[in-house]
Image: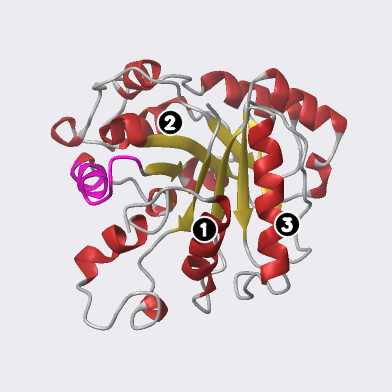
Amino acid sequence: MATAHVGVSGWRYPSWRGDFYPHGLPQRLELTYAAERMTSIELNGSFYSLQRPSSYAAWRAAVPPGVTFAVKGGRFITHLRALREVETPLANFFASGVLALGRQLGPVLWQLPERATFDPARLAAFFELLPRSTAAAARLAARHDDKVADDRALTSCEVDVPVRHALEPRHESFDSDEARELCAAHGIALVVADSAGRWPVMRDATSDFRYVRLHGETELYASGYGDASLDRWADTCRAWIAEGHDVHVYFDNDARGHAPHDAVRLVRRLGLPTAE
């Protein structure tokens, strides 16, 4: 049965302390506190560097068993290599501990830089490399190089479950029928990105799930979402769920601390069960 997964992009922000997080809450408990009030968390540290299996295992252990994690793919793949010759970097990424999330692994997010234009051949080649199950990810992870030491690599999975992928392009050339058809042919969800008008908003379904990133309604990364906006997003989520699509929504308007409050308000509008 389709459902919604709602949370924040990252959780370790100093401005949240004493606001969303109570005064005196130990930093080691911040993820638990957030996850008890939401139903999903988007991991973004994985975008900046390869993590460790022990970190993924610790994050999983810190949240209720029903909470999922979306994992942001590495910028080495999307930004530095620009999706070219990335089979080994992909192996390193999946060997770095992603599989430690087990059944709580949600979609993998691939965010492209704003300068990246639509290149169908390059995208198709990248899509074909992406593992579509944890078993396939484990096989790919086994081909890692020495950037992930053998004693820090996880190349097996405790359970074989599907792995979904979402693409967040930030160039207007992706707002085309050709781009949508290519993503649909490979089952890749195009991210619905609300960015105060900065980047194109593409709402077409190109997979069996929807992935939404809310970067700020009127000011990028900074502004919050009012009641009317959250009501509209809740209605949209319900409509997508009625169509049989799982929905993943992550608030990235963290600069002034709005993200966690907005996420909790959307969770409540959707009536999602939490551990709070």
As drawn, 208 above or below 55? above
Amino acid at circle 1: Arg
Q: Are marks 3 and 2 in contact (CB under 8 Å)?
A: no
Which badge, 3 or 2, comes first in the chain's sequence? 2
Q: Is residue 130 magenta?
A: no
Instruction: Report the front residue among 85 and 123.
Output: 123
In the displayed structure, does residue 21 sit left or right of residue 224?
A: left
Q: Are marks 1 and 2 in contact (CB under 8 Å)?
A: no
Residue drawn at point x = 67 percent, y = 69 percent: 227
- The dot on residue 149 is none
Quadrant in the picture for residue 182? top right
| Label 1, residues with CA under 10 Å away: few <14, some 14-19, many ≥20 | some
- The dot on residue 232 is 3
Which badge, 3 or 1, comes first in the chain's sequence? 3
Which badge, 1 or 2, comes first in the chain's sequence? 2
Stretch of the chain drawn in magenta:
54-66
Q: CA distance from mark 1 to mark 2?
A: 37 Å
Q: Is residue 184 visible in this depiction of the protein?
A: yes
Q: CA distance from mark 3 to mark 2?
A: 37 Å
Q: Is residue 114 visible in this depiction of the protein?
A: no
In the displayed structure, does residue 182 sit left or right of residue 8?
A: right
Secondary structure at badge 3 equals helix
Q: CA distance from mark 3 to mark 1?
A: 14 Å
The chief SS type of the magenta part is: helix
- The dot on residue 90 is 2
